[in-house]
Image: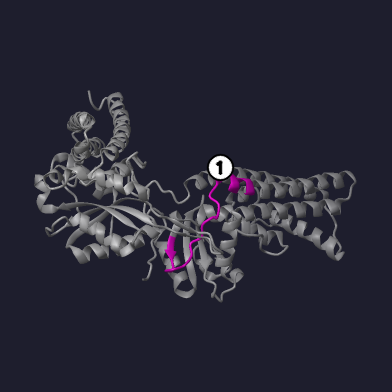
Amino acid sequence: MKYEIKIPKAFPNHEELTEAVNHLVSFLHIDAVYVSPLEHKTLVSVIMSDNNAQDDDALHDSKLADDHPDIVFKYFSGHWVEHAYKKGFPYFIMHCNAENLVYCLPEAKVFYPVKLKTKYHTYRLRKRTGEMIYAIDAYLRLYSDYMQNESYLEAVYALHQGLRFIYMMISELHGEGLKGGQDLFGQYRWVADFAPSLDDIINPNADEEKSLFEFLNASRNAIMYKTEFEVDIDTLKEANKKVRQFYGEARSLYNKLYVDYKAKLKTLHQPATVGLGILEQKLPEDYFASQVLQQINGIIKDYIKTRAVFCFGYKLFNTEIKKTKSNYFNPGYHFYLLVYTLEPKDNPAAMIEAKVRDAFGKKHKVTVLLHRKQSMPKKRDNDRWFFNKLTANGFQVGSDLNITDQPFEKDLEYSVNYWRNRALLAESHFNTAKSLTNPDDALLKNTMLHQAIVNSCLGFIELFLGYRPNRVNIGHLFALLQFITDKDFSLYFRREDDNSMYLLLSANPDMIRYKVVNQYAIEDSNELELRCTDCFWEIKQLAFAKLDALYKSHLIL
């Protein structure tokens, strides 16, 4: 399978970025490309394949950079990125993550830090930066001592070394060690891409200010090679002023990066891509998720004729971090899909979910909502409002059709009343279940608990989404509850030994007609009742909070 280049259209220079990345992929052996915004430019991080023949330094000076002055290209070998992720270098966690991935060679490794603890990584950042700051402070103190002793050549060299450590500090914060040899002007050009604010301190294009770099470079030659060097005191004082300004800016950059880095670690590979946000804003796309969705779209189309498929949410599912020599991220996803079909079939949503499960095993799963254009006039206004939100804010998979319905408003009063009625009905079922205590009552008790949970789920989903599912399968309903709340409930059957409880809760009224009554144990039913009661309490607390918010905002009376 060939992975495509997917650069978010939100980038203002989307077309230029697409052209540049296409050019890179066409003539280099590349494992992955990441794109992220900087303050004034766009950063493109290129991870080279191990068999790439190009020299990294030559790539940095390539014509591509000249053709695209508003794009910063950084090239890294796969071995270096693997090492950097193990060490927790902030650059790669900030910029080379799933959120910024725009191209990946199939089967290539996308690296992931071995330890995901925020304290661990922030400690390493503070420790390494602290070592740099200690060295810079030492050289600036040496400068002051040499000036008092009128050792001016040594004072200039102390500034030279202090500035090199300032460069090194900025450079390591942004991906790799210092490049450009000992030439301070060449090193300045290297770090200025990440710290454009340095140009406010010194203008590298002005000969007078550029001469400060030459002045400091000359001090090194005088110390190392005993060359002639006459120190101009005024130039020395001006250089000292600029170096200290650079140092202050480097400290500011570190402080800002530290805050951003800490925030990024907390959300690393945990995108906010499920929940009620889909009703208000566009769903962000994820590169890996988009590639998997293309495969799932093919599975769906092989089974049923479709007009369009929309993804309205996804979350990580069975995600694997391979903790071997290659520490890389191997994501699994749970997708929420709205499928517009063109033909009727028996229980098609469940069949699609089963076919995806067969194709991917436990790697990926889907929750499917089905919709047919022919049934649109029969839908309630709330349902049509909900579908409009999903099509407007979700992203379409495999096609680009304009599927919009006439605008509808959500009937909040109806949704609130529906929730209240379902909750009352659920409580009635719970009361009936509680009264069933005889051994032969186990099946009937399970059926009452099933009805109670189904009604509470239906009311909850209507209250939050304005949608009434036409599938009352327990697994489907809880998948929608998890989509709304992004949390597990007491009845979330995660463990293997929960299978027996799930089967008990699957009891429905039809089973009473043909199941053997005494094959169920009342003790198991009593345990199920406790868990169902806890789950109902959790659902009611969330619903009451929602109602309270509606009252306070005067959306309902």
Q: Quadrant of residue 177?
A: bottom right
Residue for point 24% across, 50% down: 391
* Residue 515 place in picture, x, y as percent: 16, 47
**Is residue 225 at least partly visible in the picture?**
yes
Magenta stretch encompasses residue 107 = yes
The residue closer to the viewer here, 364 or 314, is 364
Residue for point 54% across, 72% down: 50
Disc 1 marks a residue whose amino acid type is Val
**Is residue 41 at least partly visible in the picture?**
no
Depicted 509 relative to depicted 88: above or below: above
Magenta stretch encompasses residue 421 = no
Residue for point 42% across, 69% down: 106
Q: Residues within 10 Å of mark 1 (few under 14, many from 20)?
A: few
Instruction: Identify the magenta region.
Output: 102-124
Quadrant where the image shows the C terminus = top left
Depicted 260 relative to depicted 51: above or below: above
